[in-house]
């Protein structure tokens, strides 16, 4: 792997359209979506062409399955959704894999958040189940952030008492998740995966769970190799899935560690880097280009 990733669009080493790509996996926020949370218009005709060629397109996100399924509702048939940072993988409404947390761990995390709030931290917990997400905090500022990623969510009196398979606990910090909330979860790092998934989000999952583990499982099931896999990401929760693909791309707006880890750099999310790069590698003509 090169020490400095190469910007593929400026690298003529491989002719456009010559790559044998069977699987394309992309993060959503900061990667496929622009900063206004919009999917590039050019993606929709590209998805039709990918389907015609037999290339599987898979969103991989910290967002819940219900949110991803709604975003891609018109083209969801046959699509694999790697949801909840890899803890829940679904195709056509059928679970392909999941990695649930023990309820005692989810309860411990909820109590940790309550203590942080009591000490003055502006943070809230989202207990992520397969059927819904669950929150105790009820202020509109927090719920507005929850709605962006969890269309199926419920306000409950006690998140430790929900009757659902909990697959992840997400914490939203109105400050810096990397510098405030994540360090407060140090006690969980010895036994679980604590990953900063965005400027304001920290996710806690089983140590066996991440987007990379989900992707490798999907590759095994489908008989697709890393050499036939293209991956796009921008933040720390994308690192492991970048390692699972030979065609790994950090967006130019990515976290510095992601830029170091990927093999190539794609244009930024606001410059439609995902569809532009896919078009370049697979020799697809985008509308208006």
Image (tube, rainbow, N blue to C red):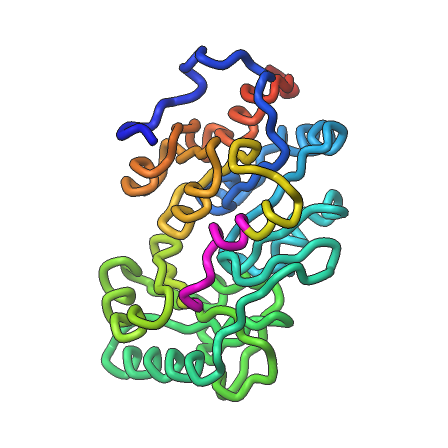
38 is higher (above) or lower (below) than 156? above
Q: Is residue 148 visible?
A: no
Q: Nearer the viewer, residue 72 or 258?
A: 258
Q: Is residue 199 above or below residue 124?
A: above
Q: Residue at x 43, y 67 (%)?
A: 205
Work out whether residue 75 can be spotted: yes
- Residue 66 in percent (x, y) is at 64, 60
Is residue 118 highlighted in magenta? no
Q: Nearer the viewer, residue 71 or 239?
A: 239
Question: Which residue corresponds to the image point at 44% horizontal and 85% vertical from the top-left?
Answer: 104
The boundaries of the magenta stretch are 205-216
Residue at image location 67% in from the left, 54% down from the top? 69
Vertical placement of residue 274 versus 12, above or below: below
Q: Is residue 214 magenta?
A: yes
- In the picture provided, is 188 more to the left or to the right than 205? left
Residue occupying the point 56% across, 84% down: 162
Which quadrant does the C terminus fall into? Answer: top right
């Amino acid at each position: 792997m090169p020490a400095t990733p190469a910007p593929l669009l400026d690298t003529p080493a491989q002719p456009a359209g010559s790559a044998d790509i069977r699987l394309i996996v992309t993060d959503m926020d900061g990667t496929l979506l622009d900063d206004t949370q919009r999917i590039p218009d050019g993606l929709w005709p590209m998805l039709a062409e990918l389907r015609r060629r037999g290339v599987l397109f898979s969103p991989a996100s910290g967002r819940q399955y219900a949110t991803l399924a709604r975003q891609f509702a018109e083209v969801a048939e046959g699509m694999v959704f790697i949801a909840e940072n890899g803890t829940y993988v679904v195709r056509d409404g059928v679970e392909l894999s999941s990695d649930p947390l023990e309820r005692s761990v989810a309860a411990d995390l909820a109590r940790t958040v309550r203590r942080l709030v009591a000490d003055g931290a502006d943070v809230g917990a989202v207990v992520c189940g397969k059927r819904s997400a669950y929150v105790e905090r009820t202020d509109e500022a927090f719920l507005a952030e929850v709605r962006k990623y969890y269309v199926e969510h419920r306000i409950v009196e006690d998140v430790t008492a929900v009757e659902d398979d909990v697959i992840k606990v997400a914490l939203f910090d109105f400050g810096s998740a990397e510098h405030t909330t994540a360090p407060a979860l140090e006690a969980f790092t010895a036994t679980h995966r604590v990953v900063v998934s965005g400027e304001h989000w920290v996710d806690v999952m089983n140590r066996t769970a991440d987007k990379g583990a989900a992707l490798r499982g999907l590759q095994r099931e489908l008989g697709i190799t890393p050499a036939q896999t293209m991956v796009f990401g921008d933040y720390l929760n994308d690192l492991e899935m970048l390692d699972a693909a030979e065609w790994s791309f950090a967006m130019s707006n990515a976290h510095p560690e992601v830029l170091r880890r990927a093999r190539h750099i794609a244009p930024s999310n606001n410059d439609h880097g995902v569809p532009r790069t896919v078009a370049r590698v697979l020799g697809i003509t985008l509308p208006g280009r």
